[in-house]
Amino acid sequence: MGMSGVALYDDYVPGLANPAYWGNTVYTTATGGVYFQNYDARDNTGHAKNSLISATQFQLVLPLKRNRVGLSLSLAPLTRSNFKVVEQTILPPSLNNGSDTLAYSIQNQGDGGLNRLELGIGVRIYKNISIGYAPSLIYGPLQNNLKVHFTSFDPNTTYNDITYDQTTTNVGFGNRFGIYGTQRKLFGKKDALSFGASVSLPINLKSERYIESDRALGQSIKTFRLKDTGAFGDGDIRFPMEVLAGLQYEFTPAVGVGTELLYQNWSDYTNFSGNHEAYMTDRYKIALGARYRPFMKRADTFLSHFKYRIGASYDSGYLKLNGHQIETFKLSAGLGILSPRNRSSVDISLEYGIRGTRSQNLVKENIWGLRLSINLAELMFYRPKLQ
Amino acid sequence: MLLLAGCEDPGVVGNEFVGNDASVVIDTLKVTDFDTTSFQAYSGGYSYFSAGQYSDPVFGDVEAIGLIRPTILNQVADTVEADAKVYLSLITDPANVYGDTTVTSTFDLVEIDAPWRQNEVKYDSDIPLSSNVILSDISIGMDDSVAVELPDSWVQKYRDYVNGVDSLKNEVYKSEYFGFALVPTNSSKIIAFKYAPGGSSTRLYVDNPADTTIRYQVIRDHATLVSRQNEPALGDSLSAFYSTQSRVFDLGIPISGDSLGSQNLARVELVLRRAEEQMTLPENNVRPPSTGYNLYYLNPDDIPFTLYSYSVGNAANVDSTDFSFRFNLTAHANSVLFEGSPNTRIIGVVKNNNGLVHSELLYNTQAALKEPKILLTTVKSGNTSN
C-alpha cells in the first residue's frame, strides 16, 4: 500500500514495521521476496536507464504464546546504494599543461548497504495494547569502484588509467521500540481502529574504510592498499533516529484504510569523517492506503481468493540539492494470491514513482517497481484439544 | 555529464553523496633539487668518432682528437707488397658536422705513443701522442669521404707487421704499434667520421700494383678525446650539458605517498626547457642536431661505469613548438611509491653517447617561468584528505 504498516497488523503476513504487534501473533509466519526496480533518469543534458533487483526482508515470526508473546527473527536491508556516474571531460592544452588535448572519463560505481539482523519480541500487555522491543546488529559494506580512463590526443604522451576500489565496512547495534493498540466496535459491530508507533534509536556505526588499487610495476600488476593520512582507517557514522506512527481503520475485517507518518532526523546524521553533510535534511513521509480482503467474508467467489491493496505516498526525501528537496511521489497497487489450503499467499505489487526535479540541472527519475513476496502462515506447534 | 543512478533510500549512509567523488587534478611543481655533475664517459667503439676544433660561442672552445688503430688481420688484405700504396679512407657524415661549414678543416696524422684499447678510453683520457707526424695538412671540407695516401715510411712499417710470421704478428703488432691520431690544426669544425663494421666505414685500403682488386683493412680500435676550454659564462638561469657526459644533470623528484591523491598517479611528467634563443650560431655554423636526453638512475656504488645499466626507461626529444623535453616518470614514481625503490635520484644525459659531440642548454631552477617542472596528473577522491 506504499506504507510500512506500523498500525496495520495482519495475522497472516509478518511485518517489520512495529515490534509491538508480534505480541498478537497467532500463526507462525514467514516471508521473503525480491524487489525489481527500473529507473529512467533525466537531466537537462541527457538521460539514462538503470535496473536493480534486490532481496527484501526475510522474516520468521513465532508465537511463543499465542496471541500473547511473539518472537521475530529477521534479516532485512536497512539502506541500499546502487549507482553509476560517468563524467567526461575534455581539457585543451592550455588547461592540461600538455602539448595536446587530453580527454578523460571518470566512472564512479557503487553498491552495497546496511543490513539489519534483528531478534525482537512483542508482548500483548493488555487486551488491546501490545509493546515490543527489537535489538539488532547493523552491518554491511559499501563499495565504490572508480575508474578514470585517459585519452591523450598526443601519441607521445601516455597516461596510466587509474582504478581503485573503496570499501567501507560498518557495524553497530540498533534498538527499536514499538507500541500497538486497537479498539474494536468503535462505530459499528465489525469495525476497528488501530494505532501503532515505533521508534528506532540512533545507530552509532563503527566503520573502517580502505582503498585498494592495482598498479603495473615492471611486467607485473600488484594490488596495493593505499594509504591516506586523514580520510581512511576508522570512523564513526551516526545513523539518525526514526519515528513512525500510523492509524488504521477497518470498516470490516475485509475492508480497511490507513495512514502513517515517518520522520527521520537526518540533520543529526554524521558521515565517516564525523561531519554533517550540508545537503542532508530531515525527512518526512506520509502515506495513505487501503486494503480489501474478501476472503475475510468467507465468500467463495473467484475474486475472494485474492487480496487487494492500493496506496500512495509522498516522501520529502533526505536530500536538499541546489535548494530543492529531492521529493518522491509514489503510487502502488498490489494483489495477493491466497493458498487454497491455508492463509499463505504470494503477494505482487506494482509501483510507480516520480523522484526529483530537472530544475537547477538536477535529475528527475521515473521509477517502476515490482515487488514479489511469499508469505507463509501455519499453525505450528499446536496441539489440538480433540484428536 | 551522463548520469546513471538508482539509489534506494537512504543509500547515502556510510558514504558521501555520489557524483563528486573523484576528480582529475593537474598540478605543476617546481623542481628545486636540480644540480649539475660530471661523469667520465667511454668514447671508443661507437658508430662515430670525431676530430676537429670549433669555438662555440655558447659552449666554448671544443677540440676533438680521433684515435685510430687499423688491424693487420683482415683476410681481404693479408699482403702488402713492397711497392703498395696504402690509403686512409675517411668516411664522414656532413649531417653531423659541428662548426663552420664554409671553412676547410685541417688535420695532422700523428702516431700514438702508448697502448690503448677502445673499450677503455674515455673522452678525457690522457693518451700521449708521439712527435712523429705521419702526414700533415689533411684537408676536409663538407665532403662525405676523403682518401689520403699514407707516406711510404709508414707503409713499410705497417707492411712489416702485416707480412710477419702468422702466429706472432698480431701479438707483435698489438704490443709495438699503437695507431695514429687525427689531430686538428685549425679551428673550424668538428667532423663526424663513420664507423660501421662491414659497411661504408672509415678504413684503410691497400693498392698492391700486381693486384687488380683494391684490398681493405678495417679499423681495429677507434675512439675520441674531447677537451673544452674557455666556456663563456652563462647566465645564472642557464646550464649547459654535453653528450660526452662531462656535464649532466642530477635531480631528485619529490615523491610523497602521504595522501591518496599522490598515490593515484596517472602521469608524472618532467618538463625541461631548452634555451633555444640562447643557442643561436653565426651564419653557416651548425651543431649536430639535438637528439634529446636519456635518464638514468644514479647508483652511488657504481658511479660512473654502470650508469647505462640503470635506465629509467625513458627518453625525450625536443618539442619543436615550445622547445621542451618531456619525460614520462610515472613508472619511476610508482616504483618508488609501491616498491620502495632506492633509486630516487635521476641523472639526465644528452643523448646519445655515440662518439659525436652534442651540446644542450637548459633553463635551470633560477629561470622564471621556464624552470624545470613536474606536471602531476593525479586522481583525487572527494573522500580523501587531499
Image (cartoon, coloured by chain):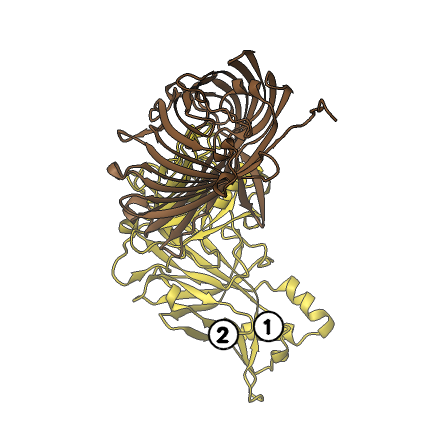
Q: Amino acid at mark 1?
A: Tyr
Q: Quadrant of the C terminus of chain B?
A: top left
**Would you name the residue on which mark 1 appears?**
B158
Indicate the position of residue A340 as horizontal and vertical percent values: 59, 40
In the image, residue B81 sits, relative to residue A345, either above or below, namely below
Residue at image coords 64%, 64%: B174
* Left or right relative to B212: residue B325: left
Asked if residue B155 is positioned above or below residue A245 in the image, the reply reads: below
Q: Secondary structure at mark 2?
A: loop
Q: Residue at x 69, y 70 (%)?
A: B169
Circle 2: residue type: Ser
The residue pinned by badge 2 equals B200
Which of the two labelled residues, at mark 1 and mark 2, occupies the earlier sequence position? Answer: 1
Quarter of the picture containing the N terminus of chain B is: top left
State the mark number for residue B138: none
Relative horizontal placement of residue B16, taking residue A58 as reference (left or right):
left
Q: Residue at x 37, y 20 (%)?
A: A267
Q: Nearer the viewer, residue B353 or A79?
A: A79
Chain A image colour: brown
In screen coordinates, is B147 left or right of B102? Answer: right
Q: Are circles 1 and 2 on residues that touch, CB within 8 Å?
A: no
Q: Position of residue A334 (x, y in %)?
A: 45, 38
* Mark 2 closeness class: few <14, some 14–19, many ≥20 residues within 10 Å: few
Looking at the image, can residue A50 be seen? yes
Callout 2: chain: B
Please state which of residues B87 and B362 is positioned toward the viewer in this rendering.
Answer: B362
Q: Which chain's residue wears label 1?
A: B
Query: Residue lying furthest top in this view?
Result: A126
